[in-house]
Image: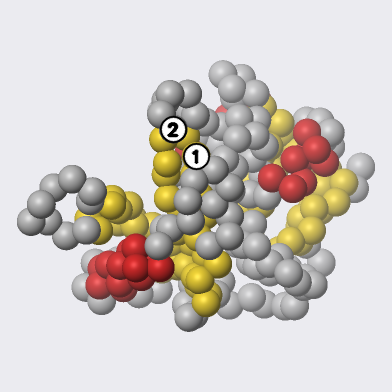
Amino acid sequence: MVEHPHKKGTYLIDFIEPNDHHTYTFIERVIVEGKEIKNEWADFTEAKSIDTIEEVLALYKKVRATDFISPDFSFQMEFGINQLSLGKASTLFYQARPFKRFEESPFEMPPPSEYFCFGTTPKEGIILPVVKTSPGELKAAHEMTEPFAWIPINITSQAPLAFRPKNMRAFLPVGMRVNTLEHNTYRWIRKADVSVVCPLIEYALIALQTGDRINIKSNGLNFEVNKTS
């Protein structure tokens, strides 16, 4: 889970639910906005109890109070729900990592926001060339010598350690679980200036080709992505 870096007091919590056959992992998103808990995305599993959500939130705030992570940054917390071990807390802390620096939205954009983007741009947006890659074919992104927008397809496994796209400025993944906080998206969201992790625009992104140019506008809460050439 993270506190949203562009809206303090809003928390994104992902609960991982392996299914009985271990063929697919469901990740259910819960959003906490102040005192309001949005828990309606439990499409495949039962909605999480309010008590569980509040326990996870309390643990996050307890870690925040230690100043283990700089107060200038949101952080990602990994946690577990204890269902078997007696004598231990029901919500367990695993680890915490810095996420994104807190930054207020610099301009207004039309709502509603479902928190599908991170990072901000100027009001007029930024224009970048596209590099689109498939799993195992990352050379074009690694070797790009100018700032670019990366569209990886199905980034569900860890990239090789030698893969370091130094000029990647925008991260727009396509495929399974793109709007989750798992490691294969979290690490690139943290690196990119701006990220759009929205499954609702998947078809528009798939239609783009390496070499196309796009204008990305984001205030950290809402976004627009438009092809320019």
- Where in the figure is residue 26, as x and y percent of width and height? 50, 39
The N terminus sits in image quarter: bottom left
Figure check: 107 above or below 73: below
Q: Is residue 61 left or right of residue 188?
A: left
Residue placed under numbered mark 1 in the picture: 26
Residue 45: assigned label: none
Q: Nearer the viewer, mark 2 or mark 1?
A: 2
Residue at the front extreme of this rendering: 46
- Residue at screen point 49% across, 80% down: 34
Q: Position of residue 160 (x, y in %)?
A: 44, 25
> Which amino acid type corresponds to the residue marked 2 in the rendered image?
Asn
Q: Is residue 198 left or right of residue 54?
A: right
Please give left or right for residue 202 compared with residue 31 in the image: right
Seen from the viewer's position, the closer of residues 213 and 217 is: 217
Furthest toward the left, the residue is 87
Residue reaching furthest to the top: 136
> What's the residue at 40%, 73% (across, down)?
72
> At which x and y percent is residue 70?
32, 70
Q: Secondary structure at mark 2?
A: loop
Distance CA(mark 2)–CA(mark 1): 7 Å
Of 5 and 47, the residue lying toward us:
47
Q: Are marks 2 and 1 in contact (CB under 8 Å)?
A: yes
